[in-house]
Image (cartoon, helix red, strand yellow):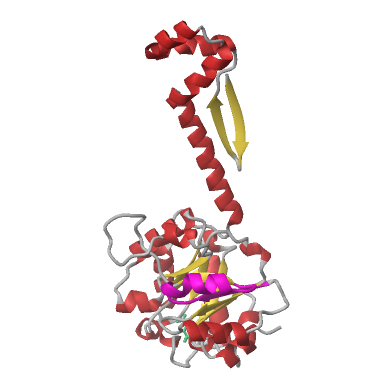
Amino acid sequence: MLISITLRNLEVEIGVPDTEATILSELNKFEYLSPPLKKNRLIPKSIANTKAIFDFPRLLNINIVASIIIVSIREIIMIKLDSFSSFFIANWKLHGNLNFIDEFLDKIQMPNDISKCIVVCPTSIYLDTLSQKKKKFFIGAQNVSQYEDGAYTGEISSNSLRDFKIDFCIVGHSERRQIFYEKNGEINLKSFQLIKDGIIPIVCVGETLEEKKQGRTNEVLENQLKESMSDSSNSSNTIIAYEPVWAIGTGLTPSYEEIESTHKFIRENNKKFNNFKILYGGSVKSSNSKEIVALPNVDGALIGGASINLDEFKKIIED
Ligand code: PGA
């Protein structure tokens, strides 16, 4: 008998033995069991039990169902981006240690407004410590391996991030692109791995000062997005962060009009990105964060320097 089940729009057919006759006829496939079975004159129910131990096709079906359930659960536990009105991602970069984590938890009170999504991204070694002590915020990694498994010394896989219940991961930050020569193709693979494991990639794109001066901002962004976004990316599993390289850590920012028009370009140039959450990053501080996040096409901020200045960060996320 074939039974058909539908799990999250995915229809699966599973073969199961329907009658005792089936069980008996299938027994012929297991000739090597015959002597003891005949000798013991087992009744069909007992036969079915004995057979189950050796029934690989059936075992395979069970495995398929188990995998589908695991994938569905992962989908279910992926953060629902649409339930938030704004995002504040604290990128600690290579800063922070155990003392700083305690100080952060002591000083920073999460906003009462639960529609604000706060994500803190420490260095990898502190992900678990922070995750265990956290209250009302999410944890993000700053990088992940493009590989799933294998001989890649020093890498951290998305699988292991999932094991530690990490919900977000920054990929393609300009410091990784410029200092570690990361290319769009790698960023694409990293995003793919993360999405597969139910972690939300925050994909960073942005032009250099030279590209801006040449009037190539939109062209650069279009190309970075085309190449670094995984085909599996969509508005519920991926976030885009626009970070002009020349604005990162410099105290310089584009004007509010420029930020808004660039975000509008990202959203409208390719219809795939119409509904994506698009964050701005680059010298966000308490004196400009409210205005930036209030722009119509800006869904939040990626904050570097000001996220490790606790007085600043407090003001940025406060209600
Ligand atoms: P910044 O960094 O806020 O210090 O400019 C932003 C970032 O690197 O994401």
- x, y percent for residue 139: 54, 70
Relative to 233, say whether 214 is above or below.
below
Instruction: Name which quarter of the figure residue 95 lies in.
Output: bottom left
Image point (54%, 46%), residue name: 70
Residue placed most toward the observer, 148 or 153: 153
Q: Quadrant of the C terminus?
A: bottom right
- As drawn, the residue found furthest toward the front would be 40
* Residue 128 shown in magenta: yes
- The region drawn magenta spans 116-137
Vertically, is 113 above or below 154? Answer: below
Q: Residue at x 55, y 32 (%)?
A: 12
Q: Is residue 250 magenta?
A: no
Give the image location of residue 270, x and y in percent: 51, 62
State the image coordinates of residue 60 (x, y, percent, origin top left).
46, 31
Q: Is residue 146 left or right of residue 142?
A: left
Residue at 38% from the left image edge and 59% from the top image edge: 189
Question: In the picture, residue 174 is in which quadrant?
Answer: bottom left
- Residue 262 position, x and y percent, is 52, 76
